[in-house]
């Protein structure tokens, strides 16, 4: 999964994220002493800030980044043996990525509402 995420091909990044999310949903019976998620937090956070030229691809990459972050949190929050996802080193990447997408979504909603009003003659 890590090698696919390192690819520059957006489709491979999205597929890798989907695989990671499936992995994150698996309940494990054995402890994961040596598992670290630094790379995944960094990569998924970067995907949340995608500036891909094609808007549809950019939105897919950003959504995959959000889903990946959700998977990391889901995987680590219930396991006392892995690193604490709530530490500042992780939250300093996760929170701005989520806020960035919330702000971007709000901007798109405002623009689309203004476009609809202009078409309807309501200004």
Image (spheres, grey):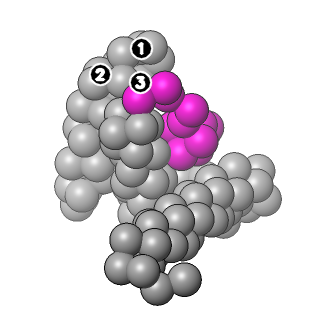
Q: Reply yes or no: does residue 63 show up in magenta.
A: no
Q: Secondary structure beneath disc 3?
A: helix
The residue that appears at 49% across and 26% down in the rendered structure is 53
How far is disc 1 from disc 2 in space, using C-alphas?
7 Å
Q: Reply yes or no: does residue 48 show up in magenta.
A: yes
Percent coordinates x, y for residue 99 in the rendering: 64, 64
Instruction: Provide the residue span drawn in magenta.
Output: 38-54
Viewed as shown, does residue 12 lie left or right of 47? left
Q: Secondary structure beneath disc 2?
A: helix
Q: Residue 12 carries which label?
A: 2
Q: Nearer the viewer, residue 119 or 106?
A: 119
How dense is the environment of label 2, judged by Cα within 10 Å: few (below 14), some, or many (20 and up)? some
Q: Is residue 105 visible?
A: no
Q: Mark 3 points at which residue?
A: 5
Magenta: predominant secondary structure element? helix
The residue that appears at 29% across and 49% down in the rendered structure is 21
Asked if the residue under mark 2 is in contact with the one under mark 3, i.e. CB atoms within 8 Å, the reply is yes
The residue that appears at 42% across and 38% down in the rendered structure is 55
Q: Which mark is residue 7?
A: 1
Residue 25 position by quadrant: bottom left
Percent coordinates x, y for residue 60 in the rendering: 34, 42
């Amino acid at each position: 999964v890590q090698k696919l995420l390192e690819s520059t091909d957006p489709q491979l990044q999205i597929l890798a994220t989907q695989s990671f999310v499936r992995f994150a949903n698996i309940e494990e019976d054995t402890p994961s002493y040596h598992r670290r998620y630094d790379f995944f937090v960094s990569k998924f956070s970067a995907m949340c800030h995608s500036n891909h030229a094609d808007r549809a691809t950019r939105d897919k990459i950003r959504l995959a980044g959000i889903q990946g972050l959700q998977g990391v949190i889901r995987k680590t929050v219930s396991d006392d043996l892995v690193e604490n996802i709530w530490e500042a080193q992780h939250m300093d990447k996760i929170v701005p990525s989520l806020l960035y997408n919330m702000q971007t979504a709000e901007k798109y909603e405002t623009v689309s509402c203004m476009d609809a009003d202009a078409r309807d003659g309501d200004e």
